[in-house]
Image (cartoon, rainbow, N blue to C red):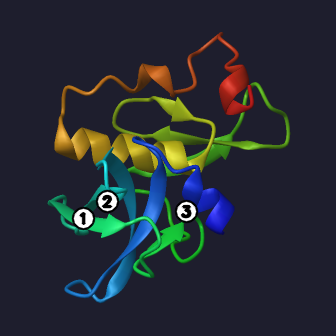
Amino acid sequence: ALRLRSAWEEGAVVEVFSASLGRWSVAVIGSIDENSFLEVKFDDGNGVVLGKHLVRSDIQLAVFGSNVRELPPGFKAVPSTSRPGEFSFLDVSTGMKFNRPDLAWRHHIERLVDPAVDPRKYADQPGQRRASLGG
């Protein structure tokens, strides 16, 4: 887990424990300062973005998939058309697909922060294979 933490960069999807919510939530790293403090942003469950500043080694941070298993609100798993036997994660409201659940979460949180965000840099584009996302 320490090796994975050291690779975290801006835009990475992680999990954060919120004492006020009493649960783990999926978060996106918004920034990392010169002292290795991570600014993470996460959904409070009602569409409100919360934030925390934590050191990379804080026990309130975890690798994505450690505690949270559900997809973001408004997403569903659908059979992949380009990867037989695998799933894509569909944003029902936009029709946009993502190859991995962490990318679906990233889009959900970034869209709450800025509704004009363009997720095409990491979304599954129709007819285009994205090697960096597993095609």
Q: Which amino acid type is shown beneath numbered disc 3?
A: Phe
Where disc 1 sits, the SS reads: strand
- Work out whether mark 2 precedes mark 1 in sequence or the reverse, and give the earlier one: 2
Q: Is residue 74 above or below residue 27?
A: above
Q: Quadrant of the C terminus?
A: top right
Gap between marks 3 and 1 measured at Cα: 17 Å
CB within 8 Å, label 2 to label 1: yes
Residue extending furthest left?
A: 48
Gap between marks 3 and 2 measured at Cα: 18 Å
Q: Residue at x 19, y 58 (%)?
A: 47
Where in the figure is residue 117, as x and y percent of width and height?
A: 26, 27
Mark 3: few/some/many CA within 10 Å (<14, 14-19, 20+): some
The residue pinned by badge 3 equals 64
Q: Quadrant of the N terminus?
A: bottom right
Near-viewer residue (101 or 95): 101
Where in the figure is residue 94, as x and y percent of width and height?
A: 36, 30
Near-viewer residue (114 or 57): 57
| Residue 73 visible in the picture | no
Where disc 2 sits, the SS reads: strand
Q: Residue at x 37, y 52 (%)?
A: 28
Where in the figure is residue 112, as x and y percent of width and height?
A: 21, 46
Residue 53 image label:
1
- Work out whether mark 3 precedes mark 2 in sequence or the reverse, and give the earlier one: 2
Where disc 3 sits, the SS reads: loop
Q: Which amino acid type is shown beneath numbered disc 1?
A: His
Q: State left or right for residue 22 relative to residue 13.
A: left
Residue extending furthest top?
A: 127
Residue extending furthest right?
A: 85
Residue 51 quadrant: bottom left
